[in-house]
Image (tube, rainbow, N blue to C red):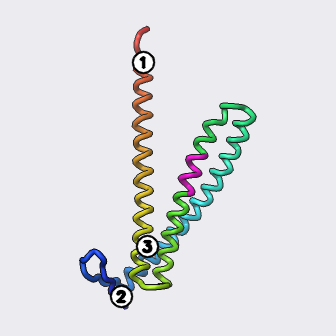
Amino acid sequence: MSEEITGQSGRGCIEVTEGALQALEKTRGWVKFLGVVSVIGACFAGLFLLIGLVVLATRGVVGIGVVVEAAIFLVVAILFSVFWLRYSKSLKRLSTTEGSLDDALVQAFSSQKKLWTLQGVLLIIALVVVIFAAIVIVVQAGAHALPV
């Protein structure tokens, strides 16, 4: 069984086979698993954020590192949770075909695009931070190596 889907880009029609739909459906379990793991990670990050805030309130600046790291991880984990679970939901919609298959497929690919965009942006940010940290380390090492 196959469905014909009309492309909106003017490229014509494509045929989506049952095998292609089943392949997408098989990925849904992993996608949902990653979403749930991200939710659990967000819960742990929230817990560490609370612990860091308590340490910060009782001991001062000592807890600032934990607070900053936990806050960043919490935001990233929440973002990943939302994107992974939305993608899983759109894949489920494909298998249940609530509405047209065309809309469901477009939604699934749109959710996937947003997920990969998020991961790409976060990778770029991480690379910039690592490069900046490396530069700072090299400059500091060079400054300490110079005779006074």
Q: Quadrant of the N terminus?
A: bottom left
Residue wearing tag 2: 3
Nearest to the observer: residue 120 or residue 99: 99
Magenta stretch prevailing secondary structure: helix
**CB under 8 Å between callouts 2 and 3?**
no
The residues colored magenta run 71-78
State how far apart marks 2 and 3 are (Cα): 16 Å
* Residue that extends furthest to the left in the rendered view of this protein: 11
Residue at 46% across / 76% down in the picture? 26
Asked whether, in this view, residue 73 is left or right of residue 15, the answer is right
Residue at 48% across / 69% down in the picture? 87
Q: Position of residue 18 (x, y in %)?
A: 39, 85
Which amino acid type is shown beneath numbered disc 1?
A: Ala
Q: Position of residue 20 (x, y in %)?
A: 37, 80
Residue wearing tag 3: 108
Residue wearing tag 1: 143
Q: Nearer the viewer, mark 1 or mark 2?
A: 2
* Residue that extends furthest to the top in the rendered view of this protein: 148
